[in-house]
Amino acid sequence: MSYDHILVETRDRVGLITLNRPKALNALNQALLREVEQALSGFDTDEGIGCVVITGSEKAFAAGADIVEMADKTYPAIYTEDLFAVGDRIARHRLPVIAAVSGFALGGGCELAMMCDIILAADTAKFGQPEIKLGVLPGIGGTQRLARAIGKAKAMELCLTGRMMGAEEAERAGLVARIVPAADLLDDALKTAATIASMSRPVAMLTKEAIDRADETSLAEGVRFERRVFHAVFATEDQKEGMKAFVEKRPASFRNA
Ligand code: HXC
């Protein structure tokens, strides 16, 4: 598969997607988002891949949806094409995905990072939902995922003022898992992804699914779902291997079965 707006490679069991529209600070046009979706689909169905990293450039993870592409669109046109519904498909992938964010993650860029399961931020990262300054509002899940990630008060403030928050504030607020010096960001993200990819692939996917339930259902339903999944993993060879390896004081070697 060849791509025009992203670079796609594999490093052992890790898939790496690099957003690659440097002249437009990786602004997310429709073609780029479709390519991200295709690359993620390819990794999801490749049993040799256990985790994916999405990254951008040093200056920008992505500075938002492509304003030039959107500016003249009409309501009937964007309603009919269901503009940005591709975001729903990106978020639905089952492998764990890490966003390695350096520089600007604004608007759709912040939304793309929030579709991922873990955000690692360079100390240079800047997050924000500045759509209100353009006379619109977030449209790829930003109002919902930001409010869930950092709470209503802070999400309101960011979306209503359009201000950016730095990496430290984002980490304190709970948006970011960890801050890394900018020069180490990709290495750290790949290492974290390799750790995840060394686990049982089906169990990692089930863990992601269970945690995602926390956003979608009541506590009682979520806990019930978790318990059913926990019981079910005892049907896997990987549970037998993981626990046997612990008892035998050796590293586990998962077979993804
Ligand atoms: C298209 C963009 C862009 C974007 C930057 N560029 N962001 N093009 N869409 N979102 C282009 C600029 O036009 C410029 O192109 C080049 O990238 C470099 O940007 P500069 O502005 O010159 O860089 P700088 O001065 O460093 O400022 C960086 C910035 C600024 C603060 C990130 O570019 C900016 O404010 N960008 C827009 C951020 C934004 O509003 N994002 C939300 C988009 S709406 P040229 O050709 O001039 O060199 C959105 C909605 C999602 O995401 C949901 C929709 C419903």
Image (cartoon, helix red, strand yellow):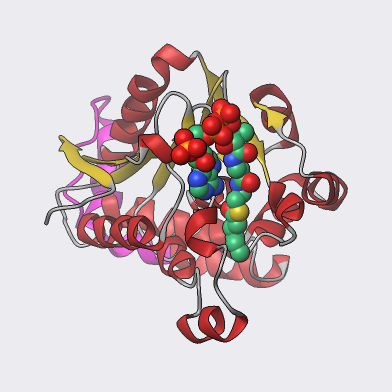
- Left or right: 74, with 23 as reference point: right
Q: Is residue 70 magenta?
A: no
Q: Position of residue 200 (x, y in %)?
A: 28, 48
Q: Which residues are magenta?
A: 231-257
Q: Quadrant of the N terminus?
A: bottom left
- Left or right: 165, with 216 as reference point: right
Look at 32% across and 40% down and name the residue there: 20
Q: Quadrant of the C terminus?
A: bottom left
Look at 28% across and 45% down and name the residue there: 6
Quarter of image, res 141 = bottom right
Look at 50% across and 79% down and name the residue there: 82
In the foreground, 38 or 190: 38
Quarter of image, res 23 = top left
Q: Position of residue 4 (x, y in %)?
A: 22, 50
- Left or right: 126, with 87 as reference point: right
Q: Position of residue 139 (x, y in %)?
A: 62, 64
Looking at the image, in which quadrant does ligand 1 appear?
top right
